[in-house]
Amino acid sequence: MGWDAALVGRGEEVARLEEALARGRAGDPCAVLLAGDAGVGKTRLLAEAAARAAGAGMTVLTGHCVDLGDVGLPYLPFVEVLRGLDADVRYADVLAAHPAVERLLRAGGGAAEYAGALPDAGVRLRLLEDVAALLGDLAEQAPVLLVVEDSHWADQSTRDLLRFLLSRLLPQRPGGAAYQRLTVFVSYRSDDLHRRHPLRPLLAELVRLPSVGRLDLRPMDDDDVASLVRGLAADPLPEDTVRAIVERAEGNAFYAQELRAATDATAGGVPSGLAEVLLTRIEQMSGTAQRVIRTAAVGGRRVEHGLLRDAVDLPDEELDTALREAVGRHLLVAAEGDAYAFRHALIREAAYADLLPGERVRIHGVFARLLGDARRRAGSAAERAHHHRAGHDLPGALTASVEAADHAARVGAPAEEMRRLEAALEVWDAVPNARELVDTDDVSLMLRASAAAVRAGEAHRAVVFARTALDRLGAHADVDLAVTVRYTLASSLMSVDELQAAFEFSSQALAMIPAEPPSRTWLWAAATYVQAAYYSRDDETARRVGRQVLAVAEELGTDDALADAIISLTGLEWASRQSPEGRERLQQARELARRSGNTTIELRALFSLAMGSFESGLLQESLRWLDDGLELARRTTRSSSPFPLEMRYLRAQLLYTLGHWDDALAAVPSTVTSSAFGHVAGAALHVPLGRGEPGVAERARALFEARPFNWLGTLVGGLVLTDEAAWRGDSDAAADWARRVLGELAEERNPYPDVGIRLSALALSAIGDTAAELRAAGDTEDVGQAVATAREFIELARTTAGWPGRRYPSTGSEGRAWLLRAEAEWSRVSGESDVALWEKTVEAYGYGNVFEGARSELRLAQALVAVGRRDEAADLARRVRETADRLGSVPLRDAVDAAVRRARLGDPGSAPAGEAMLTAREQEVLQLLAKGRTNRQVGEELFISAKTASVHVSNIMAKVGASRRTEAVALARRRGLIPD
């Protein structure tokens, strides 16, 4: 493995080794025994420690033990160390002073003839003492780090020398130094230490020594493995590829690298180089043990003892001996429940892949038969399905897969239910009597799989299942089934923003079934049609059919359909969910759905209640509805279904808005597998943006550009990218992003989505900063261009708010605040200091938006300075600074500090180091540059030559990172180096 990349993770382990190095440098000799499985990262960690030791002035000596079978070369790692010293003329005198060491080196690196030259214990002892004395002499020149790698392959002589050195660390030589500046690191593979390994007794002896410690290198955390994998790639890897490698590597750095390098890393195979390493360990065992390992590999990662015993068909005594050998070789481990498990999944994969095809099929058949006969534990249907299929018994695979899906449904595991149904459908056409075996048809199974996919949050998979069901409807004459397929497909399409297609299929469904006589099938087809018409902005049609649904549901006493109709009509007939009347209706719908036991409709009602409260500025009330909904989802194992995912998104947004930023981060799921809900993973992306953390723009761009298209993901990513550009002071980029986002989100029937107000305000904020800097620099031409761009956005904000095609006349508390913000920012672009407008903006954000309220307060403070109300401005600035500190917002804190310095509202000495970096003379020159003076004019006013003025200007540009005079003034003003 190459070590050019930075070390990933391992902070605690590095600190432990650094502590040992510090002890050695201080004359307190010590050793660390570094244990870990093959490939876990021992060599990389030692390389890092060695580099740090060398950087601290230590002499680093490294020797490696090598696997040479039963007959190894004596003292091989120490001979490697000696050769390195011999090649460096600086150590010639030290080597010459130790003849025994010199003879070992000249004898050819531990050759047999030197071993024969040690006829008695006295000569051997002299060698050991000479090596120790050599290290002592080297330590007198500079502290020494001795590294011995792979000591599990060490020969007996090397082990004896290690015992001698570590037990003394080091013996004092007559007349020698009173201290020993030595640190020793010894690594070994813990998974190679079987019960009779010769290193075991030495380790047991060494760890009892007071100066010897042991460090067990555990598998890496998943996040660290993911970082490692990403760092190995020249180009960004898809996240599903990264996740697959992380899952298979199980914390082993070498395995992760091999999987990353292999072209089939996510295809289920083991890379050839890695397979050879793993198979070598298996082939070192007896034939019987190999047979047991390969049979266990067919059984899976974990296999019960009784099941394995019956499958391998060996006498108990032979089986126990083979299992003891496999456990001793660290290939298997004893697991709970009288079972055995492979120590690493890739060991199992390699053993499984090494089976002959016929052998594999036969053993799978044995396991299927045994599991079918014994029914050894609940949930074994999934295992039987796997073994039946791998054993080429497709009827058995079909029935067991459906049985496993039924079990998954009973225990509330929709993702597993979906996968089992998918497995059943894959073999359906190959089983002639499939309908009779499972007592259903393929279309019904597909609809069931689509419903399970919805509950699992796999919206796109739900669409695929429903489309496939539609394709296979030809053989079915059942009208109810044909209608159900179409409205199910329409519902799935709405969840992935394919609204036109959803409307078409829901229209087909409703046209296929008469409204009379009333039926549940018509009810749900019509209810789906109402939602599709609503999303297609055909409100009149949605109202008309919604009233019909309401009447029929009441007539049939179908409470869940009645609840669904009430939710849909709330936004069309009853003053919307933003009104108290509308939310009262939604509570009625929630109770009807709860009474009928329809969790999906109850979750829809709770989400609508939360959204209505949020849009009305009742944030705490919204949180209460969200908590109710998420608790219901948890109890009913629906946390991954659409409404709970949207609730988690909204909850994170609410917590961010209320200023509970850490809670907002915790509210976001660690992983969201469905691309239809990618926006949920980015729900708290405004937090790292507000804190000025690196990498935010990259994450936002990935969310914005994700495909298939996700409306809310595009919205979140676009808002963050626009605001990130505004914080950087890049008004051109902020304007470009705002235009691009609106272009992506606009629809033919809704060209002015409400987010246009917020985007316009953010773009205007950046343009306002640029306009102020240009005015300060006297650049009237570019100021005019900035004003023209700003006019585009203020007109867009006003048009969006007043667009006659708006569904609701009110923009809600958030929309009103952002509209006022846009107007106030426009006043800044125009060169005004509209205190009253900024006061209204601050008041508008008082509905609960802590961060945007603080940003507006900062603008108000600047406006107050401009009209001479400095004391009020100072009070506001202090309040904004407190908010920034509480939130951990570095950009806001820097902005308020810069504003305070510009306006001289506080102590400039409190500025961070690096801000007050100009000399007094450079400050004077900068003030004149801000007034548009040339170098000659600067020189005349300050009584210096034009050449000296030019030098000062160059220094200023270099310090603020500018390439031209105007840019230098703009950057200096942004940092508070120029007063208002």
Image: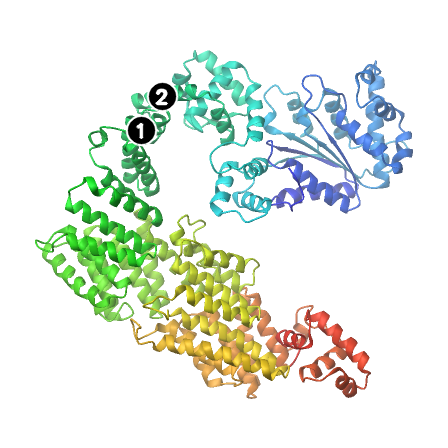
Query: Is any part of residue 617 visible from this angle?
Result: yes
Side (left or right) of 965 relative to 366:
right
- Where is residue 347 drawn, in percent x and y? 51, 28
Vertical side of 158 occupied by 590: above or below: below
Amino acid carrying label 2: it is Gly
Q: Of 610 and 959, which appears nearest the observer?
A: 959
Side (left or right) of 807 relative to 213:
left
Identity of the residue furthest to the left in this view: 517
Identity of the residue furthest to the front in this view: 474
Vertical side of 2 occupied by 279: above or below: above
Counting residues from the start of the chain, the first of labels 2 and 1 encountered is 2
- Where is residue 944 drawn, in percent x and y? 81, 84
Disc 2 secondary structure class: helix
Vertical side of 944 occupied by 688: above or below: above
Amino acid carrying label 1: it is Ala
Residue 889: which numbered mark, if any? none
- Where is residue 505 drawn, in percent x and y? 24, 54
Q: Label 1, on which residue?
A: 397
Cα separation between marks 2 and 1 = 11 Å
Mark 2 packing: few (<14 Cα in 10 Å), some, or many (20+)?
A: many
- Where is residue 544 drawn, in percent x and y? 17, 65
Query: Which quadrant of the figure has residue 583?
Result: bottom left
Q: Residue at x 27, y 53 (%)?
A: 491
Side (left or right) of 512 relative to 656:
left
Q: Residue at x 55, y 69 (%)?
A: 727
Q: Label 2, on which residue?
A: 365
Query: Is any part of residue 591 visible from this angle?
Result: no
